[in-house]
Amino acid sequence: MAQIRIENLRKDFGSFTAVQSSSFTIEDGEFFMLLGPSGCGKTTTLRMMAGLELPTSGHIFLDGDDVADRPASKRDIAFVFQMFALYPHMNVRRNISYPLVSQGMNRAEVKRRVEEVAGILGIEDILSKPVGGLSGGDRQRVALGRAIVRRPKAFFMDEPLGALDAEFREHMAQELRALHDRMGATTVYVTHDQLEAMQMGDKIVVMNHGVVEQFGVPQDIYDWPATLFVAGFIGSPPMNVLEFDGMVGSGSDHVMLGDARIEVPRQLAGAHGALGLGVRPENVHLDEAGPYRGRITATEYLGTTQIVTLDTAHGEVKARIPSDRPARTGQTVGLRFEAGAITLFDMASGRALLSEANREVLHHG
Amino acid sequence: MSSYSITAPTTAQKWGAGILVVLYAVITILPLLWIVTTGFKSQNDAIAYPPSVLFEPTLEGYVNLFTTQTRISDEELAENPPETWYDEIAADRGMSIVGPSRFGGRFLNSVIIGFGSTFLSVFLGTLAAYAFSRYKVPLKDDLLFFILSTRMMPPIAVAIPIFLMFRSLGLSDTHLGMILLYTAVNLSLSVWLLKGFIDEIPREYEEAALIDGYTRFQAFVKVVLPQAATGIASTAIFCLIFAWNEYAFAVLLTSGNAQTAPPFIPTIIGVTGQDWPAVAAGATIFLVPVMVFTILLRKHLLRGITFGAVRK
């Protein structure tokens, strides 16, 4: 098992920069998520870590050794591909044993290890089947089996649940997390699905356009986004950002949104110009006594909660409120934002302004 | 598309289609049937006009094909009575077998040159196709086009330069020369066909093998080659058919040592002129290997023709 440290990793494909100067550290035993929209460089980062792409520059430390120029076969890592990449001309047993055979392990030991892994994954009964006829879930398990049978230093997974049906995904995600907890191996997992990342990861790196936007535990990233991109990418519906022109002084604990005075966490740095007030939908409350007003344009019923879309003087706001709270389209209502949960953004740079509330998170990342 | 129909064909349509297929099959098979039957005819039946459809089959043609004979008198025949069935067939026509003909050697040449060049075309083609498919090759598209362009004229158009080149290199009438020549002609087909097949094999298989601790070459041999088996088989058929049937270069460049069967067969001349049954017998035997090879691999052949048209 291993710690993985990425330092200033960069990858150019011709004139296109897929990954620029990424740095982060994955601690031993962590379930680590690389999250971002397609084309953000997360898969390229993972492939460089695995040795399937050579970095243009930068370092990859696996347990202290710089492995950036070492071939994949010499890194002692396992990779689970999105399309599983099971060898189609071999049966399940041979697929799982294939990495052991390359090490020249004796046959009795190979057999023992394969059966042990099959036991862990619950696939003992399909060992002699060809991989062609297997269901998506079983293919997934075989792919995992091929990965864990070697007891590698780390597992790299590239959207391993992407090819599965939605209902089965949930189940497999739990299985995967349980397997990780049991093995305790460092796992790096690429996904574009923020829910999957939040649900499974110990830590998340959010990437966009080849740049690391934020790095931290899921809750910190959700509550205290470091950039507008993270605010918009994480959460469904995403964070509301009300744009306004104004200024906020260092030490200030409120901003003026038009005539409305909105309380915010105490700011540690001043800013002026185009600013954004970020607040998660669940921190927006319909309250006649609230300082701000909006007109309801739509409601979506989601069972225990409903999403209310409001039109305000500073753009659209979505609120997540209990279903039993009456809300009619066309109604104008008062709004209150939870003061302790607001992030201010500098719209020009796209970065969050430092406040007492997000100081630790932003400094850490 | 609007012309696409999912209704079942009517009985009339089925019959119509059936008749067309049978008609086409008859037209295609008739010359083959003619050759096969002629091989079993006597010399008189073979040149009879109107052609004799019903005839007494004889192995005369085959015996003549494989043997060299000389005319003997009745007295000599009485002294040396025929010992075997083929001696007897010759004796019936007043001939005596003095040894094997050159047909066996020519046929063997065909096998060596045909299969040799097929192997070389497929071997080199697979390596080249893999490189074109997986690696960043400078000027890749231009190189592929250049390779294809070697097929834009009939190969025989360059017969004279090749003839002169072979003569000065000492490759005329050698097995090696013919193998190289047929390989050169087949290579463009082989590279293009195989590239299509290898492109269809997801890279993840090789990457999985690399991660699993194998070298690039091991991954190629153990993972890519088994996946490309269909493509390799169909490419091999196409290459073999060309090399096996090739006539013009064989006439031009071979005369004895490396002469293949196609230029040899028409030259079989009996004592009484062109020995048509023997020629037909040679053609029949010559057809068999490619036929067997093709029937064995026909499934792959079909995929080879339609490759890339449908995603699996």
Image (cartoon, coloured by chain):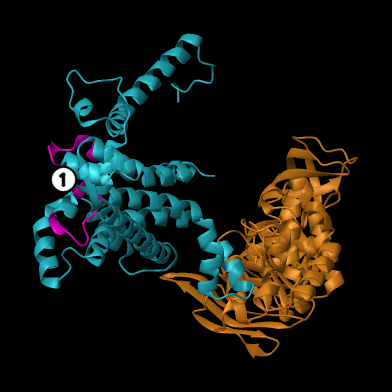
Chain colours: A orange, B cyan
- Taking depth in this image into account, of A177 and A260 the one nearest to the observer is A177
Q: Is residue B47 left or right of residue B232?
A: left
Percent position of residue A153, x then y: 73, 79
Tell me: residue B87, above or below residue B15: below
Which residue lies under the disc numbered 1?
Answer: B267
Q: Position of residue B82 (x, y in %)?
A: 30, 43
Q: Is residue B210 above or below residue B157?
A: below
- Which class describes the residues within 10 Å of circle 1: few (<14), some (14-19), or many (20+)? few
In the rendered image, the quadrant that contains the C terminus of chain A is: bottom right
Residue positioned most to the right: A324
Residue sitting nearer the eye, B293 or A167? B293
The three-letter code of the residue at mark 1 reads Thr
Nearest the eye: A363 or A113 = A113
Residue B42, image x, y percentages: 24, 30
Quarter of the figure with residue A191: bottom right
Q: Quadrant of residue B56?
A: top left
Left/right placement of residue A85 relative to residue B119 reads right
- The stretch of residues the image draws in magenta is B252-280
User: Is residue A336 in view from this perspective?
Assistant: no
Q: Position of residue B256 (x, y in %)?
A: 17, 59
Looking at the image, which is closer to me, A25 or A75? A75
Task: Determine the chain carrying the residue at label 1.
Answer: B
Q: Is residue B77 visible?
A: yes
Give the left or right position of residue A324, taking residue B96 as reference: right
Based on the picture, tell me whether residue B272 belongs to the magenta stretch. yes
- Residue drawn at (42%, 44%), measured in percent from left and top? B292
How many circles with numbers are drawn on the protein? 1
